[in-house]
Amino acid sequence: MKKLFITDLDHTLLKSDRSLSRFTIDTLNELVATSYFSIATARSFYSSSEVADKIDINAPMILLDGALIATKDKKFIDIRFIDKTTADNIIDEGAKLGIYPFIIALNNTKTLDESFILPKQLNAYQKKVLTNYKNDPRVLYTDNIQARETNIKLVYFGSQEELELLNAHLQSVFGDALEYKLAPEKYFGGYFLTILHKEGDKAHALKKVCEYHDIDFKDLTVFGDSINDIAMFELAGTSVAVANALDIVKSKATLILPHTNDEDGVAKYLCKK
């Protein structure tokens, strides 16, 4: 029986400059000769492609925090999206606090074509984040931001204080009809709040991938560093936190690595397998 290894990308597998070392690439490409390997990331298919092009990923990829599952060759497996009415209601509630989201919407499940919808009312944190999206063909600015039919997630950026307030407000309005992820934004500072379908998390997606390959959870190893990885840690037989992981993530891990993402922590662990 093959084992399954799934890793988060940013601040876990990727270095802080978003690169992969030759050692990591070679280690992972050797691993797939005897095991299944994939990624579980907040990134979309588009933004994960730079990684997927370098690694022989041979299991479905968990994308957009778990809301979308697809293979490397764009075979669509599953999706959990927020409908337009609910998403527009979320936008309206945030607007009461003067906060507007980024929206990632899926236009086509066959091509995995995405739209990245942005408000004209940008705060300082959002402007910093957008330095990574120059010349991105998905980006659409709008004066009056509105949801699409298939909204994968809404993401707010801001200070910890304002997003804690927004998080509490949205939960009071929508309750457990949605999934809420509040965490530090490690690249640019501040915090981000991600709103997803209630089953749009990595745990739901992980179950689907295990079913796809008939893998028992005891034969599953996951790697992570942040809040959205905790649900995976609670399912997997082995959960591994890199040395730079948040303390709350380390507290849920089976094993804490002595190495950070910048020290090829995941690859150093895997090369011993």
Image: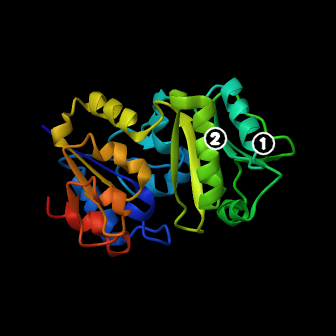
Residue type of the residue flagged with mark 2: His
Q: CA distance from mark 2 to mark 1?
A: 10 Å
Disc 2 and disc 1 in contact, CB within 8 angstroms: yes
Comparing 9 with 236, the one in front is 236
Tell me the quarter of the image containing the N terminus: top left
Residue 103 against residue 243 in the figure, above or below? above
Q: Is residue 94 left or right of residue 272?
A: right
Name the side, left or right, on which 47 lies relative to 71.
right
Q: Tell me the residue that label 2 is attached to.
A: 169
Task: Give the residue at x 52% y 41%.
Answer: 180
Please report the residue visible at 52 percent of the width from the left and 51 percent of the height from the top.
182
Number of numbered discs overlaid on the protein picture? 2
Tell me if I can see residue 213 in this picture.
Answer: yes
Please tell me whether mark 1 sits on a helix, a strand or a loop: loop
Camera-side residue of 187 and 219: 187
In terms of image quadrants, where is residue 126?
bottom right
The secondary element bearing badge 2 is classed as helix
- Rendered image: mark on residue 96: 1
- How far from the left and from the top, in percent, is residue 251? 28, 57
Q: Eyeballing the image, is 48 above or below 189?
A: above
Q: Position of residue 92 (x, y in %)?
A: 76, 36
Residue displayed at 55% across by 30% down: 175
**Considering only order in the chain, which callout, 1 or 2, is on the residue closer to the N terminus?**
1
Mark drawn on residue 161: none
Residue that lies at the very extreme toward the right in this rendered image: 143
Look at label 1 and name its amino acid: Lys
